[in-house]
Image (cartoon, rainbow, N blue to C red):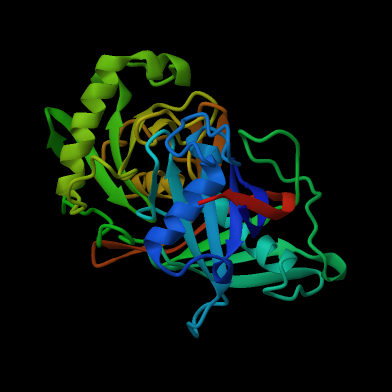
Amino acid sequence: MQTAIPFMQFRGGSSKGIYFKAEDLPKQETERNLLVLAALEGAGIGDPRQIDGLGGGTTLTSKVAVVSLSASPDADLDYLFLQVVVGKGMVTAAQNCGNILAGVLPFAIESGLMKAADPTTSARINMINTGGICEVVVQTPHREMNYQGDATVDGVMGTAAPVICNYLDTVGSTCGDLLPTGNAVDFIHGIEATCIDNGMPVIMMRANDFGLSGYESKEDLEKNEPLKQQIEQIRLEGGRMMKLGDVSRQTIPKVCLVSTPHQGGVLNTRMFIPHVVHDAIGVLAAVSVATACVVPGTVVKGIAQLNEDKNLFSIEHPSGEFTVKLEYQFHDGKMAILKSGVIRTARLLSKGELFIPAP
């Protein structure tokens, strides 16, 4: 009386998700989304605890990757990211996820979609949600996935083998432009904000403009209802300004409060995603935030502390730091982002069949 669906579960970066082959899911979007909700929430669709499904009851553990071989001559794999909105009984494909992306090539190898090389395997992954290609390299000694290594990801316990991700063509991938409003700074409800999109639409504002130090804990920020209401008003207006329309039921844009670093990084952050505070910072959000550090006149001016290596940007967050490598150049006064690189890790947690309750 239940339907069995082949799946794997990976930790990708600081997130955790369910991975499916596209061929194992319905092609029709509504049916596919209902199946995803049933997989993560079971019969209790809309239950924020997700007690009857494989979801973890948080935004970071309610994620899905749909993977297939790509028909595009520019890519090896297609990757569709689906975010289950916890407690809402809703699935959105409006954004990408760089953490879950870290598990896509390992999944493709483990599931037989791709053959591994020795000692490393690389693939060009087409990110369906927003467009753009990510070059991913994983360690495959003796043509087998290796998950053991010395790489660390703040927000994740232990060490693992590095997953190298080089993002290409992510500028304006959702909004159409790096600065969707055409300005480095806009006033939104009386607050100076930078609206930026280099892989993830983000509204950046200074923490001290809200009477905050920027070092508050995730828990303290989430208990601050007046702050959350003010930020949501700004997010809704900023979404319209960023050409995203009505974002009241969307998970983008994210909102980032920035302050001076205090652990040797370039910038300190607190990321709203959008209605809870991230334990760390998302991969593509970190890329957008790092990019704001090299765009003249953004809200990070006077706050960001650039180091001697002008290509490395250590972004501080509640559980550590996230380093982004940007390759960029200026020509005729305009900046071009050539490549955005990050290191993630991933680990296979389980595989087999999950069961969808009837009907």
- Residue depicted at x 57% and y 28%: 319
Q: Which of the pair 240/258 is nearer the observer?
A: 240
Residue 121 vertical placement versus 289 (above, below): below
- The answer to which image quadrant residue 286 occupies is top left
Q: How many marks?
A: 0
Image position of 331 (left or right of 89): left
Looking at the image, the residue that sits furthest to the front is: 1
Looking at the image, the residue that sits furthest to the bottom is: 73
- The answer to which image quadrant residue 187 occupies is top left
Location of residue 167 in the rendering, given as x and y in whole percent from the top left corner: 49, 62
- Residue depicted at x 50% and y 23%: 262
Looking at the image, the residue that sits furthest to the right is: 142
Residue 112 vertical placement versus 152 (above, below): below
Image position of 19 (left or right of 220): right
Residue 50 appears in the picture as rendered: yes
Location of residue 340 in the rendering, given as x and y in whole percent from the top left corner: 48, 58
Location of residue 352 in the rendering, given as x and y in whole percent from the top left corner: 73, 56
Image position of 52 (left or right of 205): right
- Residue depicted at x 67% and y 74%: 113
- The answer to which image quadrant residue 104 occupies is bottom right
Q: Which of the pair 110/12 is nearer the observer?
A: 110
Q: Which of the pair 108/138 is nearer the observer?
A: 108
Residue 311 appears in the picture as rendered: no
Image position of 248 (left or right of 278): left
- Residue depicted at x 30% and y 37%: 204
Location of residue 205 in the rendering, given as x and y in whole percent from the top left corner: 28, 32
